[in-house]
Image: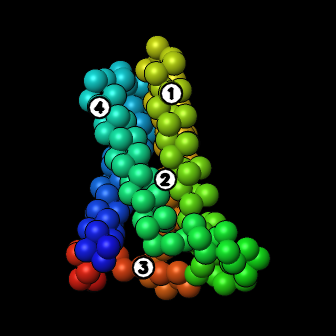
Amino acid sequence: MDILNSILQTLHNLTRWALLILAILVIIRSFRGWMNQGTYTDRDKKTTAIFTGIFDMQILIGAILFFSKGWGSVLINSGSSVMSTPAVRFFIVEHWSMMLLAVIAAHIGSAQVKKTSESAKKYLRASIWFSVSFILVLAAIPWPGMAASRPLFRLFGIVF
């Protein structure tokens, strides 16, 4: 189980960085297209699909880690004491809820883009929803210095 956890934590860490880079790329392309009144292209569509796909993979890996590390049983068995310990509360309540809201915002943005045929509206909707998603992700990451901090890079048990 330790080897599996190490692999999952490494994948979760690496996909975090892929997700952040893709989010920045999608947001820049969206704002640029909106401001320049550009035409929404197949490349924009593919970038959005990759962004939401990586996000889904990140959520899946996170869910597996959540239950394999025992956070689910801590929540069930500890109840109110979870809220009084900042690091535990972060992973059991805050991290999960913000990440779920972020992935929902990303998927709403993707759906809103698909619903309209006007490029300017596609870019505007993508700019708004993907920015909201990105802000939630940034707030939900356990950055160094937080009570629930995690290393910036984790590669199979080696941390940086």
Local packing at callout 4 (Cα closer than 10 Å; few below 14, some 14-19, many 20+) is few
Residue receiving disc 4:
46
Q: Amino acid at mark 3?
A: Arg
On residue 150, the disc is 3
Q: Amino acid at mark 2?
A: Phe
Q: Is residue 97 above or below residue 146?
A: above
Whether residue 20 is visible to the viewer of this picture, yes or no, is no
The part of the image, by quadrant, that contains residue 62 is bottom left
Whether residue 156 is visible to the viewer of this picture, yes or no, is yes
Per the model, the C-alpha gap separating discs 1 and 3 is 33 Å
Q: Quadrant of the C terminus?
A: bottom left
Helix, strand or loop status at disc 3: loop
Residue receiving disc 1:
111
Residue at position x 66%, y 84% from top? 85
Work out whether residue 116 or residue 96 is closer to the camera in this orientation and state it: 96
Local packing at callout 2 (Cα closer than 10 Å; few below 14, some 14-19, many 20+) is many
Q: Amino acid at mark 4?
A: Lys
